[in-house]
């Protein structure tokens, strides 16, 4: 029984490690904002061009919000794909 729990713990750790590395990115349509986030929505990289605020702070803020939302959605989708792939591989090895 202890071996089963250890195996499950290793499998969970494998999934968690892989999912934690996932990032989502998005660019604004005009290319002035590039954002990268992790699966929790934490910004891990933000790049702005010199003309990012050319159309004013409200427009700039909206660009950042939109990019953040799209990047986060991408990260979550990719995390699910990674988890499914790893669990499928684990299942094929007789785990879970």
Image (tube, rainbow, N blue to C red):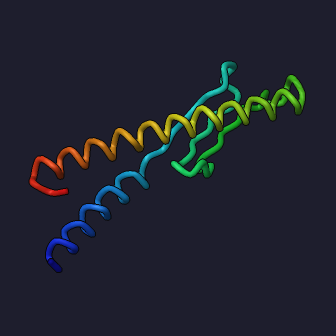
**Residue 66, picture quadrant:** top right
- Residue occupying image coordinates x 31% and y 64%: 13
**Residue 20, picture quadrant:** bottom left
What is the x, y in percent for residue 5? 22, 73
The single residue placed furthest to the top in the displayed view is 29
Tell which of 48 and 39 is nearer to you. Answer: 39
Query: Which quarter of the image is occupied by the N terminus?
Result: bottom left
The single residue placed furthest to the front in the displayed view is 1
Residue 20 vs residue 86: left or right?
right
Tell which of 4 and 70 is nearer to you. Answer: 4
- Residue occupying image coordinates x 89% and y 28%: 56
What is the x, y in percent for residue 61? 81, 35
Tell which of 92 and 49 is nearer to you. Answer: 92
**Residue 35, picture quadrant:** top right
Residue 4 vs residue 78: left or right?
left
The correct choice, above or below, for 52 with respect to 90 in the image is above
Residue 79 vs residue 44: left or right?
left
Query: Which quarter of the image is occupied by the C terminus?
Result: bottom left
């Amino acid at each position: 029984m202890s071996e089963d729990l250890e195996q499950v713990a290793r499998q969970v750790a494998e999934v968690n490690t892989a999912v934690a590395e996932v990032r989502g990115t998005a660019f604004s349509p005009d290319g002035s904002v590039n954002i990268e986030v992790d699966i929790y929505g934490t910004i891990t990289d933000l790049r702005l061009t010199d003309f990012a605020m050319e159309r004013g702070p409200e427009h700039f803020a909206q660009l950042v919000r939109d990019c953040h939302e799209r990047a986060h959605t991408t990260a979550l989708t990719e995390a699910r794909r990674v988890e499914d792939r790893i669990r499928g591989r684990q299942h094929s090895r007789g785990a879970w």
